[in-house]
């Protein structure tokens, strides 16, 4: 073939193997692009309904004093036990929770009484005390549930309540005239109960004049006029005719009212000056660090308002306002009983798993939650009272939790939050951010603090449904 003919042949297109790059790659292109970024996200942020619902009172001076009418007798306490294998013992000082022994602090006498408590095991359905029989024992429930039943006006069986771990009954056995059982106590579950015989108490009291005198004072206090809440009575007259002599009276106050001091949650936020100088566009690094730090502090604040042993709501609910579930899971009957214990309940607070457990029980009965509007948010409700989720209410390893019911506000003698605003370097109400300086490593430090507490103005403002089983049990 000639050279000219060779030139006239069309050239074949270049063959590609599929490995060659035909355009600019994505990885290289991103080096020239401006990335759209979100602000830093945080999984630990919850709805914090408790902080949103509490009415916050301004507390100047860092303390809030709750003045109440004089109450002769506070609600029944709870008993603490010590377990050693299968053996259970009562902590001697805890016997001071029994109303006749409240305030009695003679360690020797209380220890002698504790040593005379005898452990008993009861199977479900077994009777512990029978209605109509003489009260001859004090029963302390170390573990399990006990149902109190009585006889109605027409001879029918009525339920008087459920007692659980730490509760007691029969404290009249350590008084001069114990009387008879007004109910039958029957084990609902396997129960471990410590029993203190009346004869054992009389044996200790015969050798201890201080114990006898204390019980006599208790009996005298019970005889003083009081209303159904245990407060000193106010003498009044009504419905009279003519000109009778009207009773004179006064309102007595507690001599040692409780004071709530503001608690604090704090942390030190550190940001390197190089980060704050060079990497502040498009987002302010200090601002974002501070935002997430404040979120964590607010979460801790709500947790403390629920669980702190000094002012936390779970620990400050009056024992007379605590009830146990009748069967384990929260039922409509339990919610109705909890609701009936106070006027003007504004909200229920429950762990989300407790809300789910209540919904299951309602579904079994063909019932539906009500709906309520809270701040523009539709939430489930019971009898018109919103049920708000609060993940800070603990769920035990055994799968039990609690449901709180609250009346809110100072005007309603309810539950209130406490804080102080106008503090130096305030960033949010009751929270301040104070510059602490720059150290030798060029770290900028800020002290972030929030001050808070909560108060229950009268005992019936806060109620607790205890021993709420939240684990799903197959039917």
Image: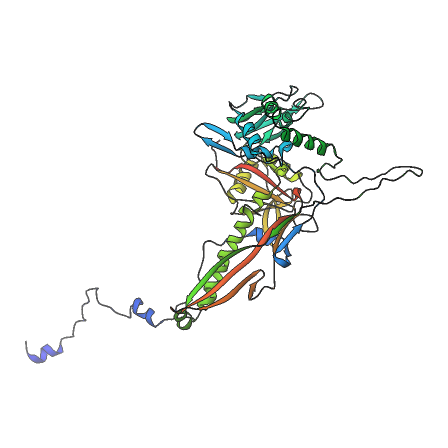
Q: Residue at x 75, y 34 (%)?
A: 224
Residue 165 appears in the rendering: no
Q: Position of residue 124 (x, y in %)?
A: 52, 24
- Answer with the quarter of the image where residue 309 lies: top right
Q: Nearer the viewer, residue 287 or 201?
A: 201
Point out the residue furthest to the top here: 133
81 relative to 129, above or below: below
Q: Position of residue 201 (x, y in %)?
A: 60, 25
In what quadrant of the picture does the N terminus appear?
bottom left
Point out the residue furthest to the left here: 1
8 relative to 398, above or below: below
Q: Position of residue 371 (x, y in %)?
A: 61, 46
72 relative to 426, above or below: above
Residue 406 appears in the rendering: yes
Q: Nearer the viewer, residue 353 or 170?
A: 170
* Colouring rule applied to residues: rainbow
- Answer with the quarter of the image where residue 26 lies: bottom left
Q: Give the mark count.
A: 0
Q: Nearer the viewer, residue 416 or 398?
A: 416
Q: Residue at x 57, y 30 (%)?
A: 109
Point out the residue furthest to the bottom here: 4
Determine whether, in the image, residue 25 is placed left or right of residue 236. Answer: left
Q: Position of residue 438 (x, y in %)?
A: 43, 69
Q: Nearer the viewer, residue 393 or 175?
A: 175
Determine whether, in the image, residue 351 is placed left or right of residue 206. Answer: left
């Amino acid at each position: 073939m000639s050279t000219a003919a060779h030139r006239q042949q069309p050239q074949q297109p270049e063959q590609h193997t599929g490995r060659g790059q035909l355009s600019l790659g994505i990885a290289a292109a991103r080096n020239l692009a401006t990335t759209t970024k979100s602000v830093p996200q945080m999984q630990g942020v919850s709805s914090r309904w408790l902080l949103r619902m509490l009415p916050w009172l301004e507390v100047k001076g860092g303390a809030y004093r709750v003045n109440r009418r004089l109450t002769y007798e506070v609600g029944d306490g709870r008993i603490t036990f010590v377990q050693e294998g299968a053996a259970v013992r009562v902590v001697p000082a805890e016997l001071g929770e029994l109303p006749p022994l409240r305030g009695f602090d003679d360690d020797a006498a209380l220890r002698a009484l504790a040593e005379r408590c005898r452990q008993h095991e009861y199977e479900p359905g077994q009777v512990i005390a029978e209605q109509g029989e003489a009260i001859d024992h004090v029963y302390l429930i170390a573990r399990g549930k006990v149902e109190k039943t009585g006889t109605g006006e027409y001879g029918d069986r009525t339920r008087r309540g459920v007692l659980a771990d730490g509760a007691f009954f029969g404290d009249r056995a350590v008084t001069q005239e114990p009387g008879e059982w007004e109910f039958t106590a029957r084990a609902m579950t396997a129960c471990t109960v410590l029993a203190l015989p009346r004869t054992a108490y009389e044996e200790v009291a015969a050798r201890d004049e201080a114990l006898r005198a204390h019980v006599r004072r208790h009996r005298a206090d019970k005889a003083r006029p009081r209303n159904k809440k245990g407060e000193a009575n106010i003498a009044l007259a009504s419905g009279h005719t003519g000109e009778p002599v009207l009773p004179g009276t006064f309102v007595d106050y507690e001599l040692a009212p409780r004071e709530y001091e503001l608690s604090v949650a704090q942390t030190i936020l550190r940001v390197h000056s190089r980060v704050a100088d060079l990497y502040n566009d498009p987002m302010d690094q200090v601002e974002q660090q501070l935002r997430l730090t404040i979120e964590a502090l607010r979460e801790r604040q709500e947790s403390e308002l629920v669980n702190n042993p000094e002012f936390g709501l779970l620990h400050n609910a009056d024992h007379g306002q605590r009830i146990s579930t009748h069967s384990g899971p929260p039922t409509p009957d339990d919610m109705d009983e909890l609701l009936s214990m106070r006027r003007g309940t504004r909200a229920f607070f429950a762990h989300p798993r407790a809300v789910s457990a209540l919904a299951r029980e309602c579904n079994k009965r063909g019932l539906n939650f009500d709906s309520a509007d809270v701040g523009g948010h539709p939430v489930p409700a019971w009898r018109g009272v919103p049920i708000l989720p609060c993940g800070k209410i603990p769920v035990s390893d055994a799968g039990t939790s609690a449901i709180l019911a609250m009346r809110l506000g100072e005007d309603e003698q309810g539950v209130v939050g406490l804080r102080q605003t106008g503090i130096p370097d305030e960033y949010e109400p009751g929270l301040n951010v104070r510059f602490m300086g720059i150290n030798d490593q060029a770290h900028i430090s800020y002290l972030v603090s929030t001050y808070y507490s909560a108060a229950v103005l009268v005992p019936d403002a806060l109620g607790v449904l205890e021993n709420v089983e939240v684990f799903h049990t197959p039917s």
